[in-house]
Amino acid sequence: MLICCLSAALLGPLCCHAQIRVNQVGMYPQQEKTATIEGTVSAGRVKITEAQTGKTAVQPRVLRTATSPWSGKRRTVIDFSSLTTPGTYVIQSGRHTATFEVKPQALRSATEATLKAFYLIRSGSPILAQYAGAYARPLAHPDTQVLVHPAAASPGRPAGSLISSPYGWYDAGDYNKYIVNSAFTMGIILSSYEQNKAYFDSLNVNIPESGNRTADVLDEMIYNLRWMFTMQDPYDGGVYHKLTNPGFEGFITPMACQKPRYVVQKSTCATLDFAAVMAQMARLLRSNADYPDLAEQAARAALAAYGWAERNPEVLYQQEKMNEQFDPDVSTGTYGDRNPSDEFFWAATELFLLTGDQKFAADAAAHQPERFVAPVWGNVGALGSYQWLMRQPQHAIAATSRAQLLAYCDAKLATTATSCFQTPTGNEPRDFGWGCLAEAFASQGLAMLYAHRLTGDARYYTAALQNADYIFGRNATGYCYLTGFGTHSPMHPHHRPSAADDIAAPFPGLLVGGPNPGQSDHNATSTFTYPSKQPDESYIDVTESYASNEIAINWNASLLALLGWLEGGAQ
Ligand code: 9MR
Ligand code: 9MR
């Protein structure tokens, strides 16, 4: 930063974007447009010019001067929504400048890259240059000989037996595959897909299946679905919690990994998440010409899984307890969840939509959440609520869901009035934490889009765009948090394939977790220091920072769901 400002100072009066925070990816001609400038500035000191000609484009007005509730920093929010002509523009405040673009389809390339990233992180198949360019790599993690861990043993599959469990995506910075998280990933993408089918169907992101008659986004989901099938024990319908190395690999390429892989313990949450997406895919793939048998297979798998969960309603995944009883010990991600009620709700909802069987509607009613929570891997109730709202609006479950959703969104909206970054999310410390850019900003943005579609109230739509703006640069650090996009984006995500290859740039189209005041990846021996302890500034672009700078499929999924809806409904 210092270097940037110094060199800019030598080159002339203009400086870097450090003090001016604006969406670096693009804004739609008709959307609300704001930027945040550090410190207190008056409107007269800020100019917005056309990048090419230097002509004044619009005179911004000061929307507010806001004070951060935790750091006390003063910031100025400027508004230039009256600028609706597509083009590239420069904001100048004193010595500082920032560039932004106004254009139709402003988020299309980000949407496409966010989807394409799933291809790049596929496990168990070669990634070919014709689709992946420089990110091509040979086959790794075939997972055709995976051990049944003692905690996963059943009479039909004793400990140590080998099963084949290929495909799926690598979860995140690590190489393991987790049912809870990949099912959530599919569920949130499909929730947006179902509301914006024509747009998602139009996306062609150049993957091996692009030539078939099925939408690329569904083909990509099917790549994971094929893995999920193998995670179900055919003897009882239960689903293994994860497929994993006993411990995390080093920072090596996928091809260099040699450690044994295990399927580990069945759990109620994994089994129900599995049932939900199997049922949803069965519905979406009905009479699909490319995959004629898949819908039927998925429906059977969903019903068998649900049956197991009914017989085993409280089998939690508790890794430490498991390690006390079984060997080898497992120390990889837990995706532990103490409450399977929301998973029951989601699974019962999808099975009701698939079968029409009132038993599932009654089960869903019995598990309906008491309040709305924007969906995250550990709380999937909203994925069920969304379906009642959009598909069964006359049902009593929908009436309750609607009141809960709107109460939630309205409470968030009320915080925008004093926001430093003109967003409904990010005005309270609890909005920051592990994966918050997706789990708070993107997921809450998506909730706003549901509220908008239900009510037609434009404030909700604006709120969703505001959260996208935050992710793309109008935030406390000035990062555009999507790799490969914007003028200042993460270069060192906690992502083994990106870190271990010989390409300087990380895989493109990946959203990092973002500011996490927990800073649990930092201790006295750490090789890095967080620049700040403030909730919204607890982010550092170093590979070591898995608590703020990892990438993950569920995070990309939440962003894809948000972006696809914004693009699909774009003005
Ligand atoms: O790489 C791991 C990442 O995927 C996880 O999210 C994270 C938290 O479970 O752990 C990372 O692995 C680290 C491990 O927990 C502690 N030693 C260092 C590992 C990576 O550098
Ligand atoms: O997203 C998960 C987050 O909510 C947890 O707080 C964190 C620590 O348990 O783990 C995150 O999930 C990680 C998973 O356990 C292993 N792969 C990487 C995931 C993203 O960091």
Image: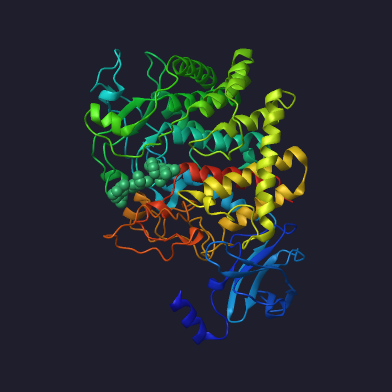
Q: Residue 400 falls in which quadrant of the image?
A: top right
Residue 84 versus residue 464: which sits nearer the camera? 464
In the image: residue 9, left or right of residue 332: right
Residue 287 seen by the camera: no
Is residue 485 depicted above or below 564 in this figure? below
Q: Which residue is at a point 37% across and 29% down the rendered structure image?
A: 317
Count of numbered badges drawn on the protein: 0
Q: Which residue is at a point 29% across and 62% down the rendered structure image?
A: 527
In the image: residue 143, left or right of residue 88: left
Is residue 509 depicted above or below 201 in this figure? below
Q: Residue 403 falls in which quadrant of the image?
A: top right
Return the x and y of residue 368 as percentages of the image width and height.
60, 26
Q: Residue 193 falls in which quadrant of the image?
A: top right
Return the x and y of residue 246 as percentages of the image width and height.
26, 36
Is residue 520 depicted above or below 383 in this figure? below
Return the x and y of residue 238 as percentages of the image width and height.
40, 19
Residue 348 versus residue 186: which sits nearer the camera? 348
Residue 67 versus residue 566: which sits nearer the camera? 67
Q: Which residue is at a point 77% across and 65% down the rendered structure image?
A: 82
Return the x and y of residue 371 as percentages of the image width and height.
61, 35
Residue 35 seen by the camera: yes
